[in-house]
Image (cartoon, rainbow, N blue to C red):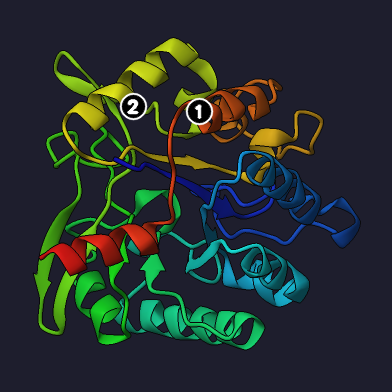
């Protein structure tokens, strides 16, 4: 069983739920150098990952997607503006999807087949998402998390297929740790930074015993303990940035201990087996 390491390619100021996001001054951007840190780490362990690129980042730094793709990693879509889908309508989502897809195609020669919404914002309030994704040729989505508040804690923890008007769509949720009454966010974000590495490894082991992939997700700022931060409320700041602890060591532990592949290759394996 292979697992998946995914990277949401966004900068330190891309934080949902704080109103209209202003672009930080270019001299403060750190996403490129932090992505290079992650690429070096992946090279060291000969691991391939899926990078969910923000269209606005790819457009501003056109060399970044090309660099990632040249190293054999998958480029998927994270939308264009890092806007919650619940703040969009059907047409706005479709426009962002097309815009980002075209940018990534021009930079890498391939159109993305995977998508992840900012802050897991696919919900019953956005019933049009799956049909639009498959209409534009997407094979999988990774936007539904089985967590309380930001997702649905009763949702499936393992990948499943969704029927749409344009064909099936694989839904591939991030890893969570089930506890009594809820799930914990050990696959990424503040939970990945906070919970003991032994707990995270135990959860990966549990997914493997269930013959399901553990999908981990990191952000470039997770390997940048000295990076800039927005001035946010305590809870929002903790969720977005956590402590200044560098996540590189725990990522290294996981890359050394487990096998990983891209989500695109994973879906291709499932399709060939069905």
* Quadrant the N terminus occupies: top left
Q: Residue, x 47% and y 11% (percent of image)?
A: 196
Query: Is residue 249 found left or right of 193 in the rendered image?
Result: right
Q: Dot 1 surroundings within 10 Å: few (below 14), some, or many (20 or more)?
A: some
Residue 77 sits above or below residue 185 on the image: below
Q: Residue, x 20% and y 49% (percent of image)?
A: 159
Residue 234 sits above or below residue 228 on the image: above
Residue 103 placement (x, y as % from top left): 60, 83
> Which label sits on residue 182?
none
Residues at marks 2 and 1 touching, judged by CB atoms closer than 8 Å: yes
Disc 1 marks which residue? 254
Q: Residue, x 62% and y 88% (percent of image)?
A: 106
Query: Is residue 138 found left or right of 164 in the rendered image?
Result: right
Q: CA distance from mark 2 to mark 1?
A: 9 Å
Residue 215 sits above or below residue 111 on the image: above
N-term mark: 2 or 1: 2
Q: Nearer the viewer, residue 76 or 229?
A: 76
Residue 264 sits above or below residue 176 on the image: below
Residue 111 placement (x, y as % from top left): 47, 82
Disc 2 marks which residue? 204
Q: Residue, x 57% and y 35% (percent of image)?
A: 240
Residue 42 placement (x, y as % from top left): 63, 44
Query: Is residue 115 found left or right of 133 in the rendered image?
Result: right
Q: Quadrant of residue 20?
A: bottom right
Query: Is residue 14 found left or right of 2 in the rendered image?
Result: right
Q: Dot 2 surroundings within 10 Å: few (below 14), some, or many (20 or more)?
A: many
> What element does badge 2 sit on?
helix
> What element does badge 1 sit on?
helix
């Amino acid at each position: 069983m292979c697992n998946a390491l995914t990277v949401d390619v966004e900068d330190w100021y891309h934080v949902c739920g704080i109103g209209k996001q202003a672009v930080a001054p270019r001299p403060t951007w750190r996403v490129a150098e932090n992505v290079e840190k992650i690429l070096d780490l992946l090279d060291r362990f000969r691991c391939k990952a899926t990078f969910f690129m923000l269209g606005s980042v790819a457009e501003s730094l056109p060399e970044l997607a090309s660099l990632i793709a040249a190293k054999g990693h998958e480029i998927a879509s994270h939308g264009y503006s890092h806007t919650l889908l619940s703040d969009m309508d059907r047409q706005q989502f479709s426009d962002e999807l097309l815009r980002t897809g075209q940018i990534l195609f021009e930079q890498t020669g391939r159109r993305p087949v995977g998508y992840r919404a900012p802050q897991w914002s696919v919900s019953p309030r956005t019933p049009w998402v799956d049909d639009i994704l498959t209409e534009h040729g997407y094979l999988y989505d990774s936007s539904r998390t089985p967590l309380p508040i930001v997702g649905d804690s009763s949702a499936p923890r393992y990948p499943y297929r969704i029927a749409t008007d344009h064909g099936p769509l694989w839904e591939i949720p991030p890893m969570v740790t089930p506890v009594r009454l809820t799930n914990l966010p050990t696959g990424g974000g503040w939970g990945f930074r906070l919970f003991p590495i032994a707990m995270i490894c135990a959860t990966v082991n549990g997914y493997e015993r269930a013959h399901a992939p553990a999908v981990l997700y990191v952000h470039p700022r997770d390997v940048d303990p000295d990076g800039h931060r927005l001035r946010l409320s305590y809870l929002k700041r903790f969720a977005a940035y956590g402590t200044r602890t560098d996540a590189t060591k725990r990522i290294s532990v996981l890359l050394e201990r487990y096998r990983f592949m891209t989500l695109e290759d994973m879906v291709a394996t499932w399709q060939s087996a069905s």
